[in-house]
Image (tube, grey):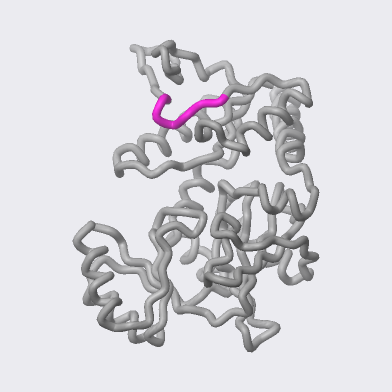
Amino acid sequence: MRIAILGNQGSWYCKKLSDAASAHGHESFQLEFRDLASHLLEAQREQFFSYDVESNSNSLNHFDCLIIRTMPPGSLEQVIFRMDLIGRLEQSGITVFNSPRSIECAVDKYLTTSRLAAAELPVPATAVCESSEAAMQQFQQLGGDVVVKPLFGSEGRGIFRISDPDLAYRSFRTLERTQAVIYLQQFIQHPGHDIRILILNGKAIGAIRRHSKHDFRTNLSRQAHAETYLPTDHEAELAVRAAELTHAEFAGVDLLYRSDSTDECYVLEVNAVPGWRGFESATKVDVASLVIEYLEQKRNNINSSHH
C-alpha cells in the first residue's frame, strides 16, 4: 500500500506509523494540512496534490490510505476546506483513517457531548452558548464550579476551572469578545485519576489509568503519570459505544469517576486523533502496527468486494 500520513513535522506518531508501514512492506509519505490542494479541471477527475518545501507537487490520487494524525488550528475557512478535502479524498476511493465524519464530530466537543447524551451515555452536566450573560446563568446553575473548555482543542490546552463569579464573568466576557463559543462543564470532584481506553475497530485494545498530583487535568502532556489498567466490562462497553456514536474506528475515550462514587462513571471525551505514547510505554502494546494491520485488512476487504 501507499500510505500518506497527515501530521506535524518531526512527530513521534508519524515516525512510528512510518516505521510500522515499512515493516509491513508498505510505502509511506508524510504530509501537512497546509500543503494540500485540489485541482478541478473541466470534465475531468478531481486531482489532489500536496506541495513540498520546494513547491513540487505530489499527486495524492495514487495513495491507498490517508492516516490523519493532526487537526491543526486554523480559520473557519481553512478548517472547512480541510474537512471538505478529506471528504472528497474519501469519495475518490482513498481510505481515510479516521473517516472525515468521525474527525468532524470528535474535534467538536459540543457535537460529541450532545450525541453521547442523546444516546443516554453519562456525560457531565454541560452548557454551550455564545453570550457571557447566558454563560453566567449557566455557571450558577452548574453549581458555581465549572471547567471551561475550548470547543476545538486537545491535550488539555486552553482548559481552566473557575469557581469565582467575578473571574467567571471576566473570562466569559473575554471569550465573547474573541467570538469564541463558551463551553462549560460542571466540575466533577474526582479521585485524581481518570481512565483512557484505546478503541480500534470496535474493540478495546488496552487501557491506562492517568494520575495527576498537581492538576485537575490528567493529560500525560501535563506531566500526569500513566499505569496499565484492566477496564471492567462496563467501562469497555461505554468506551466502545462512545467511539461508535462518533463513527471513530480508532479513538481514545476518557472516563472519570466521582470521588464519592464507585458506580458514577462519566464519558469525558472521545478523541479521534488519539495520542498513544504514554499508553504504549505503560501497556507495551504496539499501536502503530495494529493500525497498519487494520488498514491492510480494510483495503483487502475493499479490493475483494470490487472483484
The foreground one among 211 and 285 is: 211
Q: The magenta stretch spans which residues?
A: 30-35
The residue located at (28%, 77%) in the rendering is: 167
**Marker count (numbered):** 0
Q: Which quadrant of the rendered structure holds the N terminus?
A: top right
Q: Is residue 51 above or below residue 95?
A: above
Q: Is residue 155 magenta?
A: no
Asked if residue 123 lies left or right of residue 172, the reply is: right
Q: Is residue 32 magenta?
A: yes
The residue located at (42%, 17%) in the rendering is: 53
- In the rendered image, residue 220, in percent from the top left (x then y), is placed at 60, 57
- Which image quadrant for residue 296? top right
Q: Which quadrant of the rendered structure holds the C terminus?
A: top right
Asked if residue 27 lies left or right of residue 37, the reply is: right
- In the rendered image, residue 29, in percent from the top left (x then y), is placed at 59, 22
- Decide if residue 115 is in sight here: yes
The residue located at (37%, 67%) in the rendering is: 183
The foreground one among 43 and 281 is: 281
- Decide if residue 48 is in sight here: no
The foreground one among 170 and 197 is: 170
- In the rendered image, residue 177, in percent from the top left (x then y), is placed at 19, 61
The foreground one among 52 and 44 is: 52
- In the rendered image, residue 137, in percent from the top left (x then y), is placed at 28, 82
Asked if residue 151 lies left or right of residue 189, the reply is: left
Q: In this view, does 5 lie above or below 242?
A: above
The residue located at (60%, 31%) in the rendering is: 95
